[in-house]
């Protein structure tokens, strides 16, 4: 399969959206075809179910919610395959690794989460933007789905859970659950420096 599939991962407020936009702009200036996507997608029937769950319109247990997140990505597989066949560069804001990191931090089996995501196309490159949990707290609010879990379970403070999620991501970077190469980049550095480090990684994989 041609093309290049890149995933950006990290806890909330790590700077993923900013860096995705900067990378996409750089690639388009080189006259490369680029498509950016984000998960949950919300533009599929499965995505609408996730949105209803996040808005508390429906109630789901954590296992069912995890399977919906996985199914949302499955709905996108033919589109991703087609873009890659056209030699496009596909950049996603979150992918299966977020499901694994967040839900395992909340107590679900990491191996079970890995198994339910096995059938989908895996990114060639995973960029993990690493920031401290306290930095994320200052930068923005916790993800809505995570907040819902906290409300439902009356769990530990947000910062503690963010730290758990961060550790899950770092453990995956050390021992990736699937094929694909991980790069851990310090997201607390100035935006331009983070952008330059990401570009150093990506340009080596361009064909």
Image (spheres, rainbow, N blue to C red):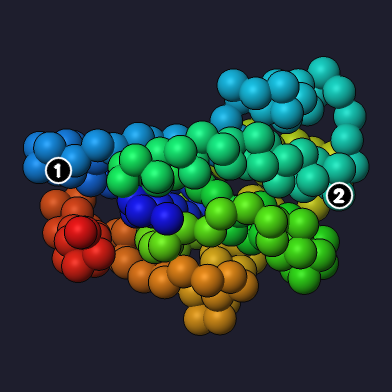
Give left or right: position of 70 versus 78.
right
In the image as oriented, which residue stretches furthest toward the left?
Answer: 30
Can residue 204 be seen by looking at this rendering?
Answer: yes
Query: Which x, y percent locates residue 202?
Result: 24, 60
Seen at 19% across and 40% down, the residue is 32
Dot 2, crowdedness within 10 Å: few (<14), some or many (≥20)?
A: few
Q: Quadrant of the C terminus?
A: bottom left
Question: Is residue 66 positioned above or below 167 on the image?
Answer: above
4 or 187: nearer the eye? 4
Can residue 131 be seen by looking at this rendering?
Answer: no
Helix, strand or loop at disc 2?
helix
Question: Is residue 28 positioned above or below 180 on the image?
Answer: above
Query: Which x, y percent locates residue 135?
Result: 41, 55
Mark-to-mark CA distance, 1 and 2: 39 Å
Residue 42, quarter of picture: top right
Which of marks 2 and 1 precedes in the sequence?
Answer: 1
Seen at 42% across and 72% down, the residue is 181
Give left or right: position of 117 versus 108.
left
For discs 1 and 2, the disc positioned in front in the rendered view: 1
Query: Which x, y percent locates residue 165?
Result: 61, 61
189 or 184: nearer the eye? 184
In the image as oriented, which residue stretches furthest toward the bottom?
Answer: 174
| Residue picked out by circle 1 | 26
Q: Quadrant of the N terminus?
A: bottom left
Query: Which x, y percent locates residue 122?
Result: 53, 58
Question: Is residue 189 positioned above or below 71 on the image?
Answer: below
172 or 44: nearer the eye? 44
Give left or right: position of 190 versus 159.
left
Residue 63: assigned label: 2
């Amino acid at each position: 399969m041609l093309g290049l599939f890149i995933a950006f991962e990290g806890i909330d407020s790590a700077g993923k959206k900013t860096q995705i936009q900067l990378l996409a702009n750089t690639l388009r200036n080189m006259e490369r075809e680029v498509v950016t996507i984000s998960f949950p997608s919300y533009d599929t029937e499965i995505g609408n179910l996730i949105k209803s769950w996040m808005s508390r319109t429906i109630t789901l247990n954590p296992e069912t919610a995890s399977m919906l997140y996985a199914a949302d990505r499955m709905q996108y597989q033919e589109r991703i395959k087609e873009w890659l066949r056209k030699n496009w560069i596909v950049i996603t804001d979150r992918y299966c690794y977020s499901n694994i990191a967040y839900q395992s931090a909340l107590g679900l089996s990491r191996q079970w989460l890995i198994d339910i995501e096995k059938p989908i196309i895996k990114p060639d490159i995973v960029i993990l933007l690493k920031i401290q949990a306290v930095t994320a707290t200052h930068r923005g609010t916790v993800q809505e789905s995570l907040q819902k879990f906290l409300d439902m379970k009356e769990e530990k403070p947000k910062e503690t859970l963010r730290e758990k999620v961060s550790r899950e991501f770092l453990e995956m970077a050390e021992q990736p659950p699937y094929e694909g190469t991980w790069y851990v980049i310090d997201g607390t550095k100035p935006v331009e420096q983070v952008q330059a480090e990401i570009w150093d990684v990506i340009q080596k994989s361009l064909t």
